[in-house]
Image (cartoon, grey):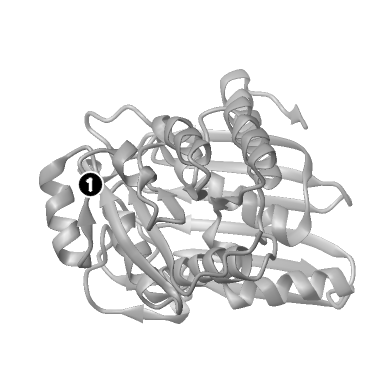
Amino acid sequence: MPITKETIGVGLIGAGDISVLHAAAIKKCPGAKLVGLWNRNQDRANQRAKEFGCKNYASPEELVADPNIDAVFVLTNLETHLEYTVQVLGMGKHVLVEKPVGVTVAEIERMKALAGAKDLVCMPGHNYVYEGGMVRTRELVDNGDLGKIVSAYVMYNIHHPEEVAARYPGVVRQILTHHSYIMLYLVGKPVELCAMKATLHYKEYKEEDIAMVQMRLHNGALAHFCASFAADDHAADPWTVMVKVIGTAGSTRYSYRDHVEIKPGLVHSQTYTAYQGSITNEVRHFLIDCLRMGQKPLSTLDDAITAQKMIEAAEKSIAEKSVVSL
């Protein structure tokens, strides 16, 4: 049932870098309030609670049990997403789970089953599809205005120092998950793929800093992913973050470079305004459109399951040096 109370109370489990963007988004969301947060590192938790003007809970159990909290954002490391999501849903609270949603397909399927049994919203943190340009592209594709889709591209080239990259599970899981749900939203599922990865600039961290994937889509079109922490693209019209869909009757483009602030971001040397904008739109859709109005997420746990299957297929392709069918 839609939430009818005047103010939707929100709690954050996890107070890392991404919590700053979510807290800013909640602040801009009418009829919503950040009640409090919990973080394993209590020094970080106290710092963030002071920054956000909210309560710091002593434990995640205390947070999810607070009757003032209606929805929880799970913003912790990937390996703990299932644990905290199950805990939140078990207390009858709605949940937004940052991506990657789960370590395996089975984990995401368990979240979906529990949310369905409890009649609660469990929304994956697939923020890019809430960008206005992505929504327009989807409409153009669905209406046939671009003609027959020929190709799609999702590119990411942002240098990450080793100490920053070490927080993440490599670009395949960390970045290609974004690419996967973006493509699913815009043009649909692939039927086969092949992938390669490399580690080019890390000295100690063992995970990959660049990966590429080639795909054949269900309609015969081809698609390409690139995800790189290895280097920035300094060329004219750089592929910092670029999404293209090309059809026989038209094409579309989305780029991070359309809005850039010359100041350091959370982990980037510049601030790409569209990133905060996509998080803000995602949070508003979750809290207002879904919880208040009863609408569905633009990207669901079913999409998260398919995206995870794509990631696991890419990992299999890399390991076996093969083309993998989905």
Of residues 296 and 177, which is closer to you in this image?
A: 296
Q: In this view, does 219 lie to the left or right of 195?
A: right
Q: How many marks?
A: 1
Q: In which quarter of the view is residue 81 placed?
A: top left
- The residue at the point 50 percent across, 33 percent down is 86
Residue 230 location (% of width, % of height):
35, 47
Circle 1 — which element? loop
Q: Is residue 246 left or right of residue 106?
A: right
Q: Mark 1 points at which residue?
A: 57
Q: In this view, does 137 lie to the left or right of 283?
A: right
Q: What residue type is labelled 1?
A: Tyr
- Look at the picture and state if 312 lies above or below 72: above
Of residues 268 and 4, which is closer to you in this image?
A: 4
Q: Quadrant of the N terminus?
A: bottom right
Residue that protrudes farthest toward the top in the picture: 320
Q: Quadrant of the C terminus?
A: top right
Pointer 1: residues within 10 angstroms few (<14), some, or many (20+)?
Answer: many
- The residue at the point 57 percent across, 65 percent down is 3
Q: Is residue 74 left or right of residue 104?
A: left
* Residue 243 in view here: no
Q: In which quarter of the view is residue 321 placed?
A: top right
- The residue at the point 81 percent across, 69 percent down is 141
* Residue 147 in view here: yes
Of residues 185 and 281, which is closer to you in this image?
A: 281
Residue 250 location (% of width, % of height):
80, 78
Residue 2 location (% of width, % of height):
63, 64
- Look at the picture and state if 319 lies above or below 158: above
Residue 161 location (% of width, % of height):
24, 48
Of residues 2 and 28, which is closer to you in this image?
A: 2
